[in-house]
């Protein structure tokens, strides 16, 4: 998304200026052409050479110190696809809100026509002051994107709002600037990840779902302007920025969360791998192995000695499978609610999409689910194929639509699949 984009990174004088170095590295890694403009105060915290080497471009530090052009800051403003100021101090925010242009950065900003994102970073009391908040309101009214600072302990030893967000978050928001906002105002409900059905306080029934596909869809929808609610089972994935996450564990909890959130949704995409069954009576304490079934080292030794076998000779041991268990553990299961079918029966205006992970007969099973569950479309894929399905970062899927249309996609990253899916949904609603 950032490949060959021309981005201006403005760096102001604050202790958080060091984070701008990592932000620069992330944008360069993504293929962007980044040029840095530093205020004189920023030079007191981070050297010009660092930014010049990493950006592979000259760094603008003043209005009249360029050997190439005295209007270089204006030239950069005209070619910029986006401008990011991180960190943005109270001083620069005040100047921009009032239209003051007295150095290279503020003068350039007067000529910028591209999207602008400002990342405030300062003492908590400064950030909460009426003047600073008034200036941020003015900039927002002018169309500037304001990335709210984080909360925590600051360099000035106070604790509260004012921390510059981590470079990864700023980078994510930079990427968002370049996505079309074709889902602006749309409410999207996504389910993701596996459910866990308790056997006892220690053990549970689950599946191999990683949640990657559902999280990719939620992230893509948010970047395109959607108001996204993600109902997620247990995963190890960091939640997408800007998404409202509802954490659940069991199928019953997920069903309840979906029913509570679906009425306001415009689009529902159910990706979660929900367990079909749950234990009828989960135990309140850990199920212990029957001591009768345990074969102690002492009894094994006695058995082997009785037949005169050498216990130091590993080859003399019988196969472990030759020991028969005295009893088997039986768990009675009960069927979980079919959440996708419930949503299909309840939906009114919503576009409802489901996922079908199959091991065989993909087309037949997917088309049957569309009819049976009142879906608008279903995304099918064969699991167990290299590069596709659970745990993988890529996926190979087929789109099946209510009108009988079928589209097969080539192997692609799950992020690419997510955006293609949203494209197709938008074409249908």
Image (cartoon, rainbow, N blue to C red):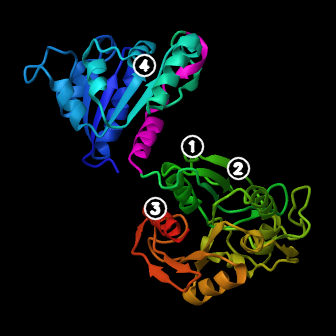
The answer to the question of whether label 2 and label 4 lie on touching residues, with beta carbons closer than 8 A, is no
Disc nearer the start of the sequence (3/2): 2
Find numbered disc 4 in the image and state the secondary structure of the residue it sits on. Answer: helix
| Residue 16 lies in quadrant | top left
Find numbered disc 1 in the image and state the secondary structure of the residue it sits on. Answer: loop
Find numbered disc 3 in the image and state the secondary structure of the residue it sits on. Answer: helix
Residue tagged by mark 4? 97
158 inside magenta stretch:
yes
Judged by depth in the image, the label closer to the viewer, 2 or 4, is 4
Residue tagged by mark 1? 242
Query: What is the C-alpha distance between the residues marked 2 and 1?
Result: 13 Å
Disc nearer the start of the sequence (1/3): 1
250 inside magenta stretch:
no
User: Which quadrant: the C terminus?
Assistant: bottom right
For label 1, count other residues whose C-alpha is less than 10 Å away and answer few (under 14), some (14-19) or many (20+). Answer: some
Residue tagged by mark 3? 419
């Amino acid at each position: 998304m950032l490949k060959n984009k021309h981005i201006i990174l403005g760096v102001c004088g604050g202790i958080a200026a060091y984070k701008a170095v990592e932000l620069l590295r992330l944008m360069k890694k993504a293929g962007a052409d980044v040029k840095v403009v530093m205020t004189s105060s920023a030079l007191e915290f981070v050297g010009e050479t660092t930014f010049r080497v990493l950006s592979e471009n000259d760094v603008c530090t003043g209005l009249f110190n360029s050997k190439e052009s005295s209007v270089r800051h204006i030239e950069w403003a005209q070619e910029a696809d986006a401008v990011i100021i991180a960190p943005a101090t109270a001083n620069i925010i005040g100047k921009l809100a009032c239209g003051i242009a007295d150095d290279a950065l503020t003068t350039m900003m007067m000529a910028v026509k591209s999207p602008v994102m400002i990342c405030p970073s300062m003492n908590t009391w400064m950030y909460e002051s009426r003047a600073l908040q008034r200036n941020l309101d003015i900039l927002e009214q002018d169309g500037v994107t304001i990335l709210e600072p984080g909360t925590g302990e600051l360099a000035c030893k106070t604790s509260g709002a004012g921390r510059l967000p981590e470079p990864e978050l700023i980078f994510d928001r930079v990427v968002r600037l370049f996505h079309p906002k074709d889902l602006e105002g749309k409410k999207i409900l996504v389910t993701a990840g596996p459910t866990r059905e308790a056997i006892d306080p220690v053990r549970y029934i689950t599946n191999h779902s990683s949640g990657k596909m559902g999280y990719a869809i939620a992230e893509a929808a948010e970047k395109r302007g959607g108001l996204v609610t993600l109902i997620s089972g247990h995963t190890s994935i960091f939640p997408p920025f800007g998404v409202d996450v509802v954490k659940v564990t069991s199928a019953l909890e997920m069903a309840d969360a979906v029913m509570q959130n679906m009425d306001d949704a415009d689009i529902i995409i159910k990706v979660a791998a929900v367990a079909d069954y749950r234990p009828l009576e989960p135990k309140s304490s850990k199920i212990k192995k029957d001591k009768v079934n345990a074969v102690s080292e002492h009894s094994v030794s006695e058995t082997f000695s009785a037949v005169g076998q050498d216990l130091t000779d590993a080859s003399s041991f019988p196969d472990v499978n030759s020991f028969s268990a005295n009893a088997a553990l039986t768990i009675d299961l009960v069927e979980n609610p079919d959440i996708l079918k419930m949503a299909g029966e309840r939906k009114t205006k919503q576009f409802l999409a489901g996922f079908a992970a199959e091991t065989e007969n993909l087309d037949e099973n997917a088309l049957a689910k569309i009819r049976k569950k009142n879906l608008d479309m279903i995304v099918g894929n064969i699991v167990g194929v290299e590069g596709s399905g659970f745990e993988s970062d890529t996926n190979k899927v087929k789109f099946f639509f209510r009108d009988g249309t079928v589209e097969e996609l080539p192997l692609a990253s799950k992020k690419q699949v997510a955006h293609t899916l949203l494209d197709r949904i938008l074409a249908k609603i």
